[in-house]
Image (spheres, rainbow, N blue to C red):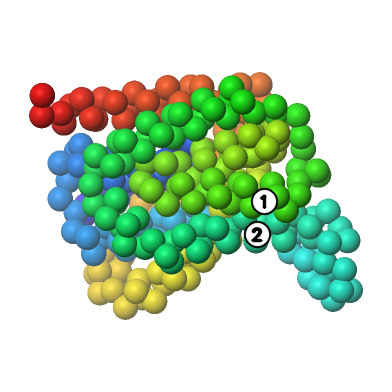
Amino acid sequence: MTIFQSIVLGIIQGASEFLPISSSGHLVLAPYLFGWEISPQEAFVFDVLVQVATMLAVIAYYWEDLVGIFSALLKGLIQRRPFAESKSKLGWFLVVSTIPAGIAALLFKDTFEEAFSNPTYAAIFLLCTSLLLVLGELIGKRRRSLTSISIVDALVIGLFQVLALFPGISRSGSTITGGMLRGFERKASARYSFLMAVPVMSAAGVLAGYDLIQSPTLSANFLIYLPGFLAAAIVGYLAIRWFIHYLSNRSLYLFAIYCAIVGAVFLLWNSPF
């Protein structure tokens, strides 16, 4: 991996992690389309680092929300009234939403890893992301705020997050769609989706942390990975800020069209016919 490749992939990760266009799909397709030969060891280390970078971006953007939720959780536990405050209840529901994907990742780990080895799968699942976004817009009522969220809502959105374990299915796109199908407003769905990213990315980082520390690739290529890490963090923060503003008065159809075009063009370009 070169510094140029690191920066480009960091920018792609930062933008596509929070926009509903699938970071995993783009990180699988981009090296293939550019003809970049990146070893699996380098790709693993870099993917973990840019995931951490985008986690820092969402923490920075939602810092006040996260501090409030965490404080309310602690207060509720100390007072033995875990659901007394709305922020505490929201915190527990965020935890509930992470459970389905965690269980699926453990049970079907090999299946998901195999899907990442084939760019064609990423292209096909990008088409699935497009379909999900269209369904959310067509069927979702989009009238509720997060103050009305229930444990059923949290579980349903968590189940939609399971889909994002496949490359090409956007985590933000699937969870925002899940929220919209439960009747939440676009901005409320996006806020919940991004807050969900913190425990999800934290858990993924912890699981991969040991392998990351043990990898000789990290120390050998640290100065190459660093620009990509910084690019992912900065672009990720800007992407969240822009996207939340965008959802104030616009739909997700633009992103649905983009995913459909990218997926279809890749499949047609690589078609044997």
Secondary element at image label 2: helix
Q: Is residue 169 left or right of residue 3?
A: right
The label shown at residue 154 is 1
Instruction: Write the residue at 49% across / 36% down.
Output: 20
Q: Do residues under tags 1 and 2 come within 8 Å of each other at their CB atoms?
A: yes
Quarter of the image for the N terminus: give it.
bottom left
**What type is the residue that disc 2 sits on?**
Val
> In the rendered image, which quarter is residue 97 located in?
bottom right
Residue 81 seen in the current view: yes
Quarter containing the C terminus: top left
Q: Which amino acid type is shown beneath numbered disc 1? A: Ala
Name the one closer to the observer, 214 or 83.
83
Classify 10 Å Cα crowding around label 2: few (below 14), some (14-19), many (20 and above): some
Q: Quadrant of residue 41?
A: bottom left
Q: Position of residue 4 (x, y in %)?
A: 26, 46
Vertical arrangement, residue 12 with respect to residue 205, above or below? above
Nearest to N terminus: mark 1 or mark 2 = 2
Measured Cα–Cα span from mark 1 to mark 2: 6 Å
Local crowd size for mark 1, using a 10 Å CA cut-off: few (<14), some (14–19), many (≥20)? many
Q: Where residue 52 appears, x then y in whole percent? A: 47, 59
Give the labeled residue for mark 2: 96
Q: Residue 173, which numbered label? A: none
Residue 86, position as x, y percentages in the image: 83, 53
- Which x, y percent locates residue 38? 19, 54
Q: Residue furthest left?
A: 272
Residue at the image position 66 percent from the left and 21 percent from the top: 249
Left or right of residue 186: residue 51: left
Q: Nearer the viewer, residue 15 or 203?
A: 203
